[in-house]
Image (cartoon, helix red, strand yellow):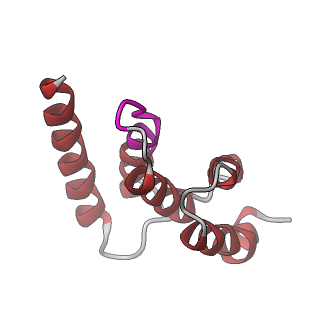
Amino acid sequence: MQDVDFSETFGTLRLRWVKANPKSTAGVSCLQTCVLHWDLVNAQQIAAILDKSSTNSNDRRFMFWSITLTFLLSISPQCPEGKQKLYSLLALKQLERAAETTAKV
């Protein structure tokens, strides 16, 4: 199966599942699968959902993945037309938030 097909089918289904079950540990598996298939659009959204729904404030893994995937999406041809600047700015704001969070510790 081509990766483009994955993004439009299984990637979208995995994103919907994570949206419906944001606190489930299976969300990590959905994120891993999307990254393995280089589906940056759905992986970025899944990482953002997992970051926002994380209950452990000391665990920054999801924050890292959210920032990384947002940046990778911003420089990827998968990025929707005209959204590169938006995703670049979002990655920058996420980095600033991460710096503020770690400075408080």
In the rendered image, residue 19, in percent from the top left (x then y), is placed at: 54, 71
Quadrant where the image shows the C terminus:
top left
Residue 56 falls in which quadrant of the image? top left
Q: Nearer the viewer, residue 91 or 104?
A: 104
Residue 36 position within the rendered picture, expressed as x and y whole percent measured from the top left: 70, 46
Question: Which residue sits at x=54%, y=62%?
Answer: 22
Above or below for 35 versus 99: below
Viewer-proximal residue, 78 or 63?
63
Q: Residue at coordinates 63% horizontally, 47% vertically from top-left? A: 28
Q: Is residue 97 left or right of residue 36?
A: left
Please tell me how many numbered marks the rendered image carries. 0
From the viewer's perspective, tell me whether residue 101 is left or right of residue 51. Answer: left
Between residues 81 and 87, which one lies in front from this camera angle? 87
Q: Where is residue 39 shown, x and y percent of the image? A: 61, 59
In percent of the image, x 38 and y 76: which residue is there?
A: 81
Q: Is residue 62 above or below residue 30?
A: above
Q: Which residue is at a point 47% across and 63% down the rendered structure image?
A: 45
From the viewer's perspective, is 93 left or right of 72?
A: left
- As drawn, 87 above or below 102: below
Query: Quarter holding the N terminus?
Result: bottom right
Q: Residue furthest right?
A: 1
Is 17 placed above or below 23 here? below
Which stretch did the figure color magenta? 57-65
Expressed as whole percent of the image width and height from the top left, the position of residue 33 reads 71, 51
Q: Is residue 54 magenta?
A: no
